[in-house]
Amino acid sequence: MNTIRVIANEKRDPAFAYANEVKAFLDGRGFDAEIVHPCAQINSALFCVVLGGDGTMLRVAHYAAVYDIPMLGINLGNLGFLTDVDKKQGIKAIEKVLAGRHSLEKRMMLEADFGAEEIVPLQKRLALNEIHIGVMGKLVDYSIYVNEQRMATIRADGIIVSTPTGSTAYNLSAGGPILVSGGQMMAITPVCPHSLSARPWVVGASDTVRVVAKQNSQVFVDGYERGSVPVGESVLIKTSDFRATIMRTTSLNFYTTLRKKKLL
């Protein structure tokens, strides 16, 4: 198989100008490069070249992880935590990958168990960043259980359960902790809690987290609404067996990246 998918975000790459440049480069090296939409259900490829920002990487990861397809991110967006290089270094990064001069990062993902699987298929229950249970603009009581042991009941706008990858995203904005990217842990962070004593928690990757809402609530997976849970029912969150594979051609470490993004 010599197929390489070029994932193009038209908002970031008008008329797919850069995507076609990447495709021409890969075709010229004897590969079968195909330009596809970020939401395309990718099930086979040597790897994916993802053109966009972290949001584009997240959308691709939900499918690529299930089929163990590595992703090389070229940043056309803003922060670019998940992407490897900016646009001006993009072709050079692809050259390094083709020459085998790259490393692979396996990133932990979460899986949300709620509703019927035929209604919410696996790819839409996988999170590389976070799972958020909440009601927009409304305080609700949430009971949180870790390994089926009640931890707390918190009145808040919602509850975020984050991976280390997602700890610098919505979790951070909500006051949650930064977790090292290769760590095996989850952060549980209440959103705007109606209590001065409510604080985030960090639990292990082998733990399970169950959130029971005292009112009908929405379930958001990596920022996308994936369904709802009726009052009294729960969302079970656990570490998934699937991992997102991110290709790296640069040597920036986690803390250097945080400083570069002005988070330290």
Image: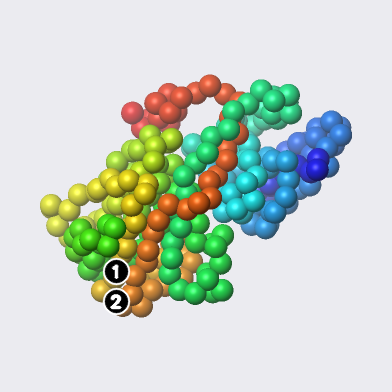
Instruction: Describe residue 22's horizontal placement relative to residue 221 as left or right.
Output: right
Q: Which residue is drawn at 64% across and 32% down?
A: 87
Instruction: Describe residue 102's horizontal placement relative to residue 194 as left or right.
Output: right
Q: Position of residue 43 (x, y in %)?
A: 70, 54
- Name the residue tied to disc 2: 232
- Name the residue tied to disc 1: 212
Residue density around tag 2, few if under 14, some if 14–19, many if 20 or more, within 10 Å? some
Q: Position of residue 147 (x, y in %)?
A: 29, 58
Q: How many labels does the image show?
A: 2
Q: Residue at x 47, y 65 (%)?
A: 225
**Proximity of marks 1 and 2: CB atoms separated by less than 8 Å:** yes
Towards the viewer: 139 or 127: 127
The amino acid sitting under disc 2 is Gly
Q: Which of marks 1 and 2 is nearer the N terminus?
A: 1
Q: Would you place residue 83 above or below residue 67 in this image?
A: above
Q: Which element type, helix, strand or loop, lies under badge 2? A: loop
Q: In which quarter of the image is the N terminus?
A: top right
Q: Position of residue 71 (x, y in %)?
A: 62, 40
The amino acid sitting under disc 1 is Val
Towards the viewer: 253 or 85: 253
Q: In which quarter of the image is the C terminus?
A: top left
The answer to whether any part of residue 169 appears in the image is no
Give the CA separation, mark 1 to mark 2. 6 Å
